[in-house]
Structures are given as C-alpha cells and as structure tokens.
Image (spheres, rainbow, N blue to C red):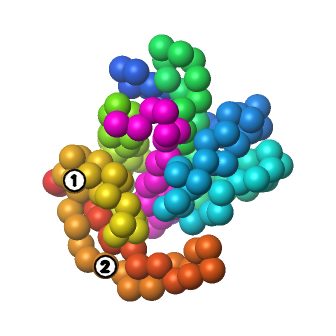
Amino acid sequence: MEVKVLITELHTERLHLRKMNASDSSSLFKIWSDPDVTEFMNVSCFTDKNQAEDMIRLLDELAQNNKAIRFSIIELESNEIIGSCGYNSLDFENAKAEIGCDIAKAFWGKGYASEAICSLLDYAFSSLKLNRIEAKVEPENVKSIKVLQKLNFTFEGTLRQYEKSKEKFNDLNMYSKLITD
C-alpha cells in the first residue's frame, strides 16, 4: 500500500490551516477551556494549559504515523487562531477519513467551520484520493449538523451508544460525503 504524504498547510479565502505545533497551545487552551466549545467534543473542558500541550503532542504522534492530522485554524484578517480541524482518523486502505472541527465561540456563525471543512474535503478527494469522508456528531449538536447539511453530507443513521465520553455513552449520528456526491 502506498503511503500518502500529508500536507502541513491549506489555504482558503479567509483562513490559513496549518499543522498544529507546540506554540499553539496557549491559543488552543483558550478555545478548549470553553465549556460551550467542548460540549460536544469527546474531551472534557480543559482546565490546565498542559492539557493542550499534551493533546498537541498526541496529535503530532498520530500525524507522524499518517493516522490523523490536525490543523490550527488561523483567521487571516486578525492572524488569530480561532479553532482547529482535521482528519481525526485516516484509513488509506479503505480510502476514507473522519473529519472534525472546533471553532472559538467568538467566531461562531461566520462560516469558518464550513470554509475549513471544504478545504479538508477538497484536499482529501483531490490529493489524498480518498473516496469517503465521515463525520460523527452527537444528535444534540445542531450547529455542526447544520454545517454538514450545508456541505451536502448524507445522514446515514444513528450509532446507538457508540462512544463513551464524559462518563456516559453517547449516540452519534453518522454523516458522509463521497467523492461522487
């Protein structure tokens, strides 16, 4: 099986997505310590900057093994990190990936999540030659579901009690987009 080389940065009209690095920890900690942002993430609200540093280290290990890659989302106008996005898992054998995205609350409702995810989709289908992109979302996460619907993802069904997060089992809705969609 051919090993894909993952890009370390992507660009959109308003955003620069670049591979996360240790210097992003303060900015990302501010985002990941907001309970509104982490409400539907499979991590608890961060309470210590070291948690952000540990998360970045873990994500870097996954990236080195081509298992995942996470980008810091930088708004070009302010040059501020406003969130993160990426491929939470990469499965080249089956030509698929799972995506995820989080945006700082101050930047919600401005189309940044859609713009970042579009960039991930374009790269996945054109450069990585993937066939399928998946997104798993808690049914109560209406904002994320609206983003996926806007991007023409297909709702495939509910995975019952699929993931244990924050001490309880959660249902997850499965959405997908195929290269042929």
- The magenta stretch spans which residues? 86-109
Q: Residue at x 57, y 66 (%)?
A: 42
Q: Is residue 33 left or right of residue 10?
A: right
Label 2: which secondary element: strand
Q: Quadrant of the C terminus?
A: bottom left
Q: Residues within 10 Å of mark 2 (few under 14, many from 20)?
A: some
Label 1: which secondary element: helix
- Separation of marks 1 and 2 at Cα, in angstroms: 15 Å
Q: Is residue 158 visible?
A: yes
Identity of the amino acid at label 1? Gln
Give the answer, above or below, for where 146 lies relative to 41: above
Give yes or no for residue 105 being in the magenta stretch: yes
Give whichever of 128, 159 is nearer the camera.
Answer: 159
Quarter of the rendering containing residue 46: bottom right
Residue contact between numbered discs 1 and 2, judged by CB atoms under 8 Å:
no
For label 1, the residue is 149
Give whichever of 29, 106 is nearer the camera.
Answer: 106
Task: State the residue lying farthest toward the top.
Answer: 77
For label 2, the residue is 158
Identity of the amino acid at label 2? Thr
Q: Is residue 119 left or right of residue 75?
A: left
Q: Residue at x 53, y 50 (%)?
A: 37
Give the answer, above or below, for where 111 lies relative to 58: above
Q: Residues within 10 Å of mark 1 (few under 14, many from 20)?
A: few
Q: Is residue 123 visible?
A: no
Give the number of marks.
2
Q: Residue at x 34, y 52 (%)?
A: 143
Q: Whole-percent x and y of residue 94?
A: 40, 68
Give yes or no for residue 48 being in the magenta stretch: no
Pointer 1 or 2: first along the chain: 1
Q: Residue at x 51, y 78 (%)?
A: 163
Q: Whole-percent x and y of residue 56?
A: 72, 47
